[in-house]
Amino acid sequence: MPDAPIGMVEGPSSPAFGRLRHPVVLSWRQYRLERKMFWRNPSAAFFNFVLPLLILVGAGAALSGNQHQLNRLVPMIAGMSVMSTTFTALAYNIVFLRERGVLKRIRGTPLPTISYFGGVAANAVTNTALQIAIIVLSGRLLFGIGWPQHWGALIVFVLVGVVCFAALGVAFAHVIPNFESTAAYVNAVFLPVVAISFYVFDSSSAPGFVRTIAEALPLKPLIAGLSGAMVAGKGLGSHLDGLAVIAIWGAFGLYFAVRGFSWETSRT
Amino acid sequence: MNDGGPAIEVRDLHKRYGDYEAVRGIDITVQRGEVFGLLGPNGAGKTTTVEILEGYRKRTSGEVSVLGYDPAGRAIELRRRIGVVLQSGGIYSHITPREALKHWASFYPHPREVEEVLALAGLQEKADERSRKLSGGQLRRLDFALALVGDPELILLDEPTTGFDPEARRAAWETIRSLRALGKTILLTTHYLEEAQALADRVAIVKDGRVLAIGPPRELGVGAAHYRVAYRDPDGELVERETDDPTALLHELTAEALADGRRLEELSVGRPTLEDVYLELTADA
């Protein structure tokens, strides 16, 4: 073999960190990278994280003294946080990475698809878990709500909600044609869903058809389930129909997330 | 490496997008250790062909083998052995080149040292800068680095130096030559004639989804295409002469002019262009 020019490539080398390539290890590495990037991106951290908490604190202060309203507010914010940390965040991220060509580059490497999505999903779960923890703490410390009565039901609803909204977020990314229009597309779904779900959850006088729509969407059942677990002391048993609605949306989302997934921009 | 066959074999490759046929029957064979160039204008089908080899696109028909694999199967084993530089590929904005390379290295069984790859790509000074702060040229170096960190035996480069200034282009050429010196197989696409001449052992000239000619650059009319020397003669007439040896012709012309005490007004030397080569190739056909 001829001599390589000075400062150029030399013989093969294999540092120790390259040895562990099990898909679970690679998933963990992807997860750690996602966490690092999340905290380095102030605007993502703000919108996914700080904003719902600001709403909670703001609305909580306005409703101060009205325990009945506070009891409703906290699970509503918790449900919205599940949606924003998964649906909104993933739709944004996937579209951004797709349009920038990052996904295409990853696709060309031996990183297994399952490891990539494992890391991305674990990142979303971490954000949701952190937010729910902060909301539960705020409820306990600031708004006179005790500790959640049913931890088990809380965990199940958060998990099913995360899977459902994460899958819907990835599926929805496929519909968004370019990064510039992401905010418009995401908000066109997020804001009406949050509005109708909050309204129906909070008001017993909502018109029948509005209630039917809200009950058929996944956010209202999620809020009801979270409310049962966090405030009312109701377990899973009294919210099985709601859980079924969320699960059906989740299955629908997963199907389209996998089927419609596109690794590169459609501009060719 | 032990299966001995060519690194890449493509037989009668066709790719159709709806009504448009981007690739219309391409045949190429790339031997191991060879630098092979796909030379052609934009829209010739170069990128489509390379992306089929990389497993990004499914072919409409034809046979394709890359290191013995059908790339359409997207075998992880194959992806461990190839390095890909896309025509345009993004990278996470909030991590540094060093972090990106460490992460990428973890995908491969026998990666190169990150430091070595940073040096190779000329990125040491920017190694700890967030990638969103890198210039276009620096990001392109990172593309090279990310493709090389897995120590691939076959490297596919899609227009690796498009948009480079001459200095950056020379640096990239040096990198590619050093990879060749290591026995790597390289397939690169380019629309720069001089890039194909400078780097490729063999070139396939493609246009409209077909191979017009294939062989070492010098034998293809790539070398035979003529330089154009132009100037105004004493009567003010614009004269254009074609030559294979511009040095000798210039010497002759300038010696004559100096002896007569006149200037060669509007003297210019034009390098042969891809268009000249096409004209020559299609004129023969």
Image (cartoon, rainbow, N blue to C red):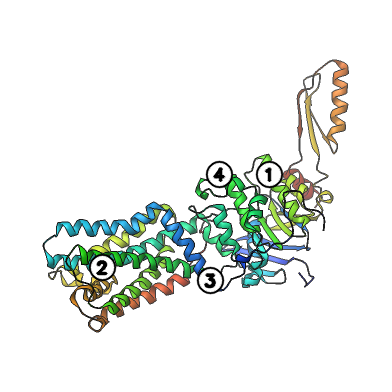
The residue that mark 4 highlights is B135
Q: CA distance from mark 4 to mark 2?
A: 45 Å
The N terminus of chain A is located in which quarter? bottom right
| Dot 3 alpha-carbon crowd within 10 angstroms: few under 14, some 14 to 19, many 20 or more | some
Q: CA distance from mark 3 to mark 1?
A: 38 Å
Give coordinates of residue A46: x percent, y percent: 34, 54
Marked residue chain, label 1: B
Q: Which mark is residue A25?
A: 3
Element carrying mark 3:
helix
The residue that mark 1 highlights is B169
Give coordinates of residue A73: x percent, y percent: 19, 65
Going by the numbered disc 4, the residue's amino acid type is Ser
State the image quarter where residue A23 is shown: bottom right
Give coordinates of residue B183: x percent, y percent: 77, 60
C-beta proximity under 8 Å, tags 3 and 2? no
The residue that mark 2 highlights is A136
